[in-house]
């Protein structure tokens, strides 16, 4: 299927940035969202110059309902037919009895509530056009729980449930919903989780993780299927990872 404009949340880094690059190379116009606007502006300049596409950027915090309402007012918003719900994070690996509830709020409000609010704002436009594809960034953490991951896993289990339920809600509209569930991808994710570059490096030590580009290519493949084909979910592990905590290190 061909798309006119993609809205990508979390386009300032990692998977979102790689998806922006791969969609731009296909000539898809973009609406890029994140909090770090200066990164988005640099990306806009580069992608517009290289691919002759239109790129709109918008600084928004997915935790803030007002920011999402403001996104819906942007001219490019109504023309979006491809939504990549990618903005997300993990914070800490403390046990529930030791954790800081502010970390839970950050994860649940960004990964779940923000995703829902934005999807809710965009769907009426897609339904009216009878075309659209919603791609959610779930995780293998949305299928299997690991020690210290209870709340991040809960947020990604929610993304999986929302993806399944949304597919049911949208039946008959022609819209598609895909849940992408990666294992270890080397991005800024671990740095954000541990608030430490050193500790983040250790996560990928001695193994070959997935790259953001690997995930972007999988997403591109899923959205390019013919209109009658819906890739419901994709679980993508690096070859060196057989299960969440079963990692081969050299
Ligand atoms: N890396 C992995 O191993 C992995 C595995 C499975 C799933 N995932 C999922 O993949 C998605 C992308 O993660 P990544 O690996 O690319 O991590 P990343 O490099 O840290 O990128 C995260 C992106 O989300 C944005 N973001 C975070 N909080 C936000 C907020 N409140 N409002 C707006 N934007 C926000 C960040 O932008 P700003 O900071 O500029 O706002 C950034 O662009 C996440 O949903 C993550 O859970 C990652």
Image (cartoon, helix red, strand yellow):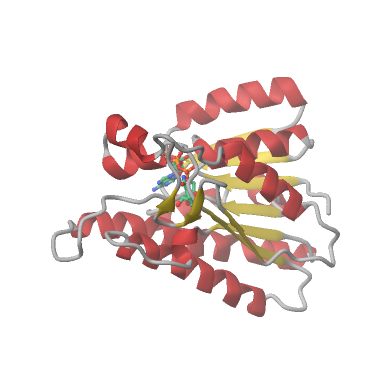
Q: Front-most of 91 and 26?
A: 91
Q: Residue at x 66, y 66 (%)?
A: 124
The picture places residue 165, in percent across and down from the top left corner, at: 58, 77
Q: Position of residue 26 (x, y in %)?
A: 79, 37
Q: Is residue 215 left or right of residue 245?
A: right
Is residue 75 visible in the rendered image? The answer is no
Residue displayed at 62% across by 47% down: 7
In the rendered structure, the answer to whether residue 168 lies left or right of residue 198 reads right
Q: Quadrant of residue 127?
A: bottom right
Q: Quadrant of residue 52?
A: top right
Quarter of the figure that contains the N terminus: bottom right
Q: From the viewer's perspective, is 220 left or right of 189?
A: right
Does residue 169 lie above or below 21 as drawn?
A: below
Residue 176's quadrant in the figure? bottom right
Q: Is residue 54 at all visible to an observer of this figure?
A: yes
Q: Residue furthest front?
A: 250
In the image, 32 versus 88, the foreground residue is 88
Number of numbered discs: 0
Please identify the quadrant where the C terminus is shown.
top left
In this rendering, would 85 be left or right of 231? Answer: left
- Point 51% across, 46% down: residue: 240
Q: Is residue 92 positioned above or below 27 on the image?
A: below
Residue 94 pos. (x, y %): 21, 56
- Which of these two is toward me, 125 or 36? 36
Quadrant containing ligand 1: top left
Percent from the top left, x then y, of residue 232?
Answer: 67, 67
């Amino acid at each position: 299927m061909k798309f006119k404009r993609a809205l990508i949340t979390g386009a300032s880094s990692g998977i979102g940035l790689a998806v922006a690059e791969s969609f731009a190379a296909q000539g898809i116009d973009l609406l890029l969202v994140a909090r770090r606007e200066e990164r988005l502006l640099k990306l806009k300049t580069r992608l517009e110059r290289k691919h002759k596409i239109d790129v709109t950027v918008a600084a928004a915090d997915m935790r803030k309902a007002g920011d999402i309402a403001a996104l819906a007012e942007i001219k490019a918003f109504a023309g979006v037919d491809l939504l990549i719900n990618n903005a997300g994070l993990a914070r800490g690996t403390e046990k529930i009895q030791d954790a800081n509830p502010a970390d839970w709020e950050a994860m649940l409000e960004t990964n779940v509530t923000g995703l829902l609010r934005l999807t809710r704002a965009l769907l009426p436009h897609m339904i009216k056009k009878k075309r659209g594809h919603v791609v959610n960034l779930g995780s293998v953490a949305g299928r299997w729980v690991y020690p210290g991951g209870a709340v991040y896993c809960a947020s990604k289990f929610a993304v999986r449930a929302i993806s399944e339920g949304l597919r049911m809600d949208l039946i008959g509209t022609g819209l598609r919903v895909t849940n992408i569930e990666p294992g270890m991808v080397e991005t800024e994710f671990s740095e954000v989780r541990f608030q430490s570059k050193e500790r983040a490096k250790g996560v990928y030590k001695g193994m070959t993780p997935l790259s953001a580009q690997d995930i972007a290519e999988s997403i591109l493949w899923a959205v390019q299927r013919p209109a009658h084909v819906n890739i419901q979910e994709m679980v993508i592990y690096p070859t060196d990872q057989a299960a969440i905590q079963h990692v081969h290190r050299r």
